[in-house]
Image: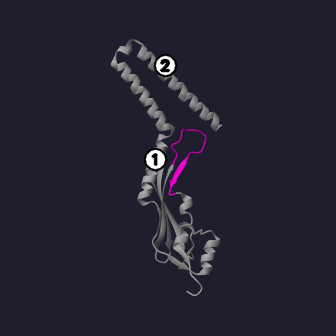
């Protein structure tokens, strides 16, 4: 169904472009051809049509992806504030669970470490731009041991029945498992 929708949008755009070109051709060949205002009107309408087509056809995604990358360079990525040595058994327990720490709302009082996450909307309309901060916190003193700051763009696509696109910075695969940078395995003799 999405293929048919895309074909329909492309056909509509092609038809509207053809109508505008025919209109421009008629204006430049008609009585208005001798006036500069008529030619200027054709140029303005054509440039506006092409500019709007580019913006909604993908230009705004390119622009906001660039904004996300720009903000990400300033303060995105992994930051480690304190490294913690864990006994071998505790370290292996975290490793076996693939470093899944509980979120603050679901953490038990016995959980010594937990995650806290906050999302701020830099831009709420389409496309949406967000700044998300995920922190690892030690319960005993509420110290932030490390954090990942991630920017993202969602949406900005042509309307349709398909899923919208997204862009994240830094790449989630590069910041995955950042807990391993915070938690270190203590040797038995320590």
Q: Is residue 123 visible?
A: no
Q: Magenta segment: does it hold 164? A: yes
What SS does tag 1 mark?
helix
Q: Quadrant of the N terminus?
A: top right
Q: Which mark is residue 127?
A: none
Query: In which quadrant will I find the C terminus?
Result: bottom right
Residue at the spot of label 2: 22
Give above or below for 100 relative to 87.
Answer: above
Q: Magenta stretch: dominant SS?
A: loop
From what the image shows, is residue 181 above or below residue 17? below
Looking at the image, the residue that sits furthest to the left is: 36
**Image position, residue 186 (x, y; %):** 56, 81
Q: Residues within 10 Å of mark 2 (few under 14, many from 20)?
A: few
Question: Which of disc 1 and disc 2 is earlier in sequence?
Answer: 2
User: Is 140 located above or below residue 174 in the figure?
Assistant: below
Is residue 110 located in the magenta-colored stretch of the structure? Answer: no
In the foreground, 95 or 66: 66
Residue stretch in magenta = 154-170
Q: Secondary structure at mark 2?
A: helix
The residue under the point 41% across, 58% down is 74
């Amino acid at each position: 169904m999405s293929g048919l929708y895309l074909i329909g949008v492309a056909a509509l755009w092609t038809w509207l472009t053809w109508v505008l070109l025919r209109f421009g051709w008629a204006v430049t060949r008609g009585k208005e051809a001798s006036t500069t205002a008529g030619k200027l009107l054709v140029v303005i309408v054509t440039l506006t049509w092409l500019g709007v087509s580019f913006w909604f056809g993908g230009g705004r995604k390119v622009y906001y992806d660039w904004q996300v990358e720009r903000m990400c360079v300033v303060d995105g990525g992994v930051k480690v504030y304190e490294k913690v040595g864990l006994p071998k058994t505790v370290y292996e327990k975290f490793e076996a669970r693939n470093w899944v720490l509980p979120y603050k709302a679901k953490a038990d009082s016995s959980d010594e470490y937990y995650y806290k996450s906050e999302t701020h909307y830099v831009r709420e309309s389409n496309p949406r731009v967000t700044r998300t901060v995920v922190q690892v916190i030690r319960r005993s003193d509420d110290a932030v041991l490390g954090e990942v700051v991630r920017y993202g763009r969602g949406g900005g696509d042509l309307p349709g029945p398909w899923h919208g696109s997204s862009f994240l910075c830094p790449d989630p695969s590069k910041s995955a498992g950042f807990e391993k940078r915070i938690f270190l395995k203590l040797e038995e003799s320590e």
